Amino acid sequence: MKVVVSIGGSVLAPDLESQRVRGHAEVIESLANEGCTIGAVVGGGGVAREYIGTARNLGANEIELDDIGIDVTRLNARLLIAALGEQAAPSPAETYEKAGTAMHRGDIAVMGGVMPGQTTDAVSAALAEYTNADLLVYATSVNGVFSDDPNEVDDATKYDELSAGELVDIVADLEMTAGSSAPVDFVAAKLIGRSGVRTIVLDGTEPERIADAVLNGEHNGTDIIPHGTDDEMTYWVQE
Ligand SMILES: Nc1ncnc2c1ncn2[C@@H]1O[C@H](COP(=O)(O)OP(=O)(O)O)[C@@H](O)[C@H]1O
Ligand SMILES: O=c1ccn([C@@H]2O[C@H](COP(=O)(O)OP(=O)(O)O)[C@@H](O)[C@H]2O)c(=O)[nH]1
């Protein structure tokens, strides 16, 4: 099975704690040892946001800030590569082609960001589409996609299942400035709808949950049904 795992910076590197990175590397290795071909995409986390905040105060524009964010995602990718050792391609892939080639020869490919105007959520969805992945897993800091930001709105409700179109509607109004937060960004939601890749958004703060979802199909997050219709949504609401 070919799997792209998107590890949010908030999950992998809210700080620079090595044990947390090691835990994620161990889970990715365990998936590879079970026969999965893996592409891992790593976000920027708190460190990226600190750099972006400082550079914004210094007058950098949003594209310049995105480029700073990309640099930090690639640094975080290097941390994951360090923890993975020889099973990983030795440097973060800067193109989908390089990541796909690494996966094709059996290495674990690790990517950070690739271009301004998006986040690593979109990189993950594009890598999944490029490699015809069977599964795309977003490991983020909340337990799926909610009706509103659960860290801001107390009665936000979690969706067990969403169509890709419904996901697009939910994330369309979220901010797209450098360093902003979204469970899955807008570009990613559109790409998921286009590619039809099976997608799960889950809480990855305990990395074993990623393995459970991939190997056993067990998770408490949100399933994104790529070609789902509004009828499916109605069905979910009525249940
Ligand atoms: N509708 C929503 N559902 C879930 N999370 C949301 C929603 N809207 C905003 N968020 C916020 O998005 C955050 C995840 O984004 P981010 O911090 O960028 O994560 P990651 O590092 O995993 O990419 C959550 O912690 C939550 O506060
Ligand atoms: O392809 C990319 C990936 C990342 N970023 C920038 O880098 C920041 C950090 O990346 P991401 O949001 O994926 O990190 P996370 O939310 O997972 O911490 C983003 O907010 C963007 O500003 C970008 O411009 N293009």
Image (cartoon, rainbow, N blue to C red):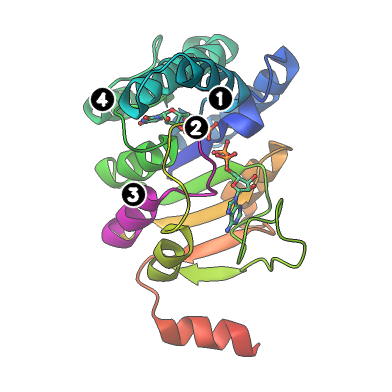
Camera-near label (4 vs 3) is 3
Tag 1, which secondary structure? helix
The residue labelled by disc 1 is 49
User: Which percent across, then down, holds residue 89?
Assistant: 39, 15
User: Which percent across, then down, holds residue 185?
Assistant: 43, 48
What amino acid is at disc 2? Gly
> What residue is at 36 percent from the left and 46 percent from the top?
133
- Residue 214 within the segment the image draws in magenta: no
The residues tagged by marks 3 and 2 sit, at their Cα atoms, a distance apart of: 15 Å
Asked if ligand 2 lies within 8 A of label 4, the reply is: no
The residues tagged by marks 2 and 1 sit, at their Cα atoms, a distance apart of: 5 Å
Mark 3 vs 2: CB contact within 8 A: no
Query: In the rendered structure, which disc, 3 or 2, sits on the residue that comes first in sequence?
Result: 2
Camera-near label (2 vs 4) is 2
Query: In the rendered structure, which disc, 3 or 1, sits on the residue that comes first in sequence?
Result: 1
View extreme (right): residue: 154
Instruction: From the viewer's side, name the closer residue of 209 and 237.
Output: 237
The residues tagged by marks 3 and 1 sit, at their Cα atoms, a distance apart of: 20 Å
Residue numbers of the magenta segment? 179-195
